[in-house]
Amino acid sequence: MHRSKLWLVLGAFIVAMSLMAAGTAGGAAQKASAGSVTFGAEQEPPCLNGFLEGCNNTWTSWTAGVSLASVYIVWPNFSLAPYMGSGKVLKKKPFTLLVNLKKKAKWSDGKQVTADDLIFTWKTIINPNYELAGRSGWDSISSAKKINSKTVRFVFKKPYAPWKIMLATSVLPAHALAGENFNEVWNTNYNNKQGVSMASGPFKLSNYTKGQSLTMVRNSSFFGKRPSLDKITFRFITVTDSEIQAIRGGEVDMIYPQPQLQLAGLRGQSGLGIQTNAGSTLEHIDINTGSKSSNPLLRQKWFRQAIAYSLDRQGMVTQLFRTLNPRLKVLNNLTYTNQQKGYVPHFKKYVRSLTKVNQLFRAHNCTKGGDGIYSCGGQRASVKLGTTAGNRLRELAVEILQAQAKSAGIEFKPANSPSRLFFPAVSNQDYDLALFAWVGTGDPAGQVDIYGCGEPKSADNPTGAGGSNWKAYCNARVTSLLKASDAQLNPKLRTKENNQADAILSNDVITIPLYQKPTYFVYKTKVKGLKDNSTLQGPTWNTENWKTS
């Protein structure tokens, strides 16, 4: 499944820089051998409809999302390959795309995956009544014409360079969802109107017990290689130490935790394998400038800059990763990773400087109180910093950042909560500072959903922020550059436009990048066919290849 530009680490319902698809390339059918595995899932999906902004989570995509295939899939090397179909550019003016679905692609209820489903997916994504995480690319389509039962011709209002990323979005079944309220219909299951669990991917949802587990069973109608496993059970284990104990004790067959210091103890343990890769998981701090934030100072650019100058990001990274990855660098760009050619370190200027922090506060007539915290016009420099509870590395990061900020005269009050509560609160703009990650594809598509003024202004959205812009941030120039980037077919000019936007974002400090998080896939060696995919596609991208020895 895919999500918006980046999956929240969070996953792929709508893919934009960010969001993920399920499965791997198809192949000849083979006789399946019975078997099942249990996956220790670090987060419980907030809900199962990963298209929605409050449920746009990697673990939504990596669990239930395995049900829903997409036209393209992101491979571990960050390339995009045809999966349930393929696309072809017919014309550049107007930009016209022909999309074909595989003849064997069909739903678990026996009906074919058709051109009607592609058109329905487009119409659902652009429907303003639905609270979606992103619409990038789909909102540039002006018309869709059914050529035959498996082919659609899309005509765009303007060119859309990352069209393959757009087509890495999960395809929806029109016959199962037409006439339903998409904000509600698939929050706890993927059933059609007759109660049959819908799937086009290798597995289908069998059972979901909130707070405990989610079970997927083989989809016998899958268009690709017949899965060897009968069943995959995702057991929600949201505390890192418990995950490690579960894999050590044989309670689960695999875990995919965010990197933690304790994982080093699993190296060399008999019967366990570990795969780790540098991925596209971008850990960062989002800053909420909206009315629901607890401190009006957050709306002031100078105050956000003071926060950035109060932090020693490299010191935090070194302390967190000196055992797991001592060479890990601070991330200084919101669009490109350290390995990419387009990487320009615009945020490099934010090195801890008490001198600059003091200058900013004094320039705005602020004074330190007896507790060492600044006050400005009676408003204390005190804000909430939250992350996903149970993730010990993140909790430790909050503690480190809290100490750094306090010594600079800024108070961070920890506000951690379980992922099933944390992410909905963030998407509802009910936070001050939020530490989490986006998972991307390696392509800068969809940044406008994260940082742009993408939606009409309303009482609920006074700034007109993009679908996954939960910071109440709206800079017309940034929006213009990001939209121009998505329409730019020249790769060099596209990179230039993204970096121009990133330079402005570094000055506005609406987000503070931290680091590029490595992946850790730990599993019993008796389970074969596992291959880490450090893109938003995640560890379950090739479940049809899994088998037990």
Image (cartoon, rainbow, N blue to C red):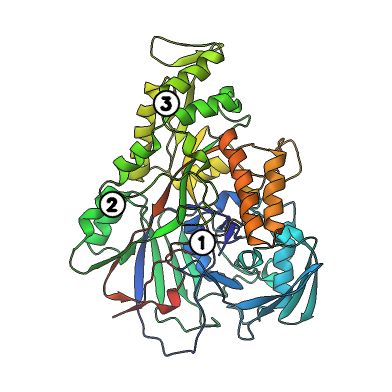
Q: Nearer the viewer, mark 2 or mark 1?
A: 2
Q: Residue at left 57%, top 78%?
A: 108
Question: In the image shown, does 72 or 345 lie closer to the viewer?
Answer: 345
Instruction: Indicate left or right for 93 with 176 as reference.
Output: right
Occupied quadrant, residue 145: bottom right
Q: CA distance from mark 2 to mark 1?
A: 26 Å
Check disc 3 and report its element: helix, strand or loop.
Answer: loop
Q: Residue at left 45%, top 68%?
A: 76
Q: Which mark is residue 353?
A: 3
Q: CA distance from mark 3 to mark 1?
A: 40 Å
Residue 377 in the image, given as x and y percentages of width and height: 56, 11
Question: In the image shown, does 258 or 114 lie closer to the viewer?
Answer: 258
Check disc 2 and report its element: helix, strand or loop.
Answer: loop
Residue linked to disc 1: 61
Q: Residues within 10 Å of mark 3 (few under 14, many from 20)?
A: some
Q: Residues within 10 Å of mark 2 (few under 14, many from 20)?
A: some
Q: CA distance from mark 2 to mark 3?
A: 28 Å
Q: Which mark is residue 324?
A: 2
Quadrant where the N terminus sits is: bottom right
Residue 531 in the image, given as x and y percentages of width and height: 38, 71
Give the mark, 3 or 1, whose residue is nearer the N terminus: 1
Is 106 situated above or below 321? below
Q: How many marks?
A: 3
Residue 360 in the image, given as x and y percentages of width and height: 52, 19
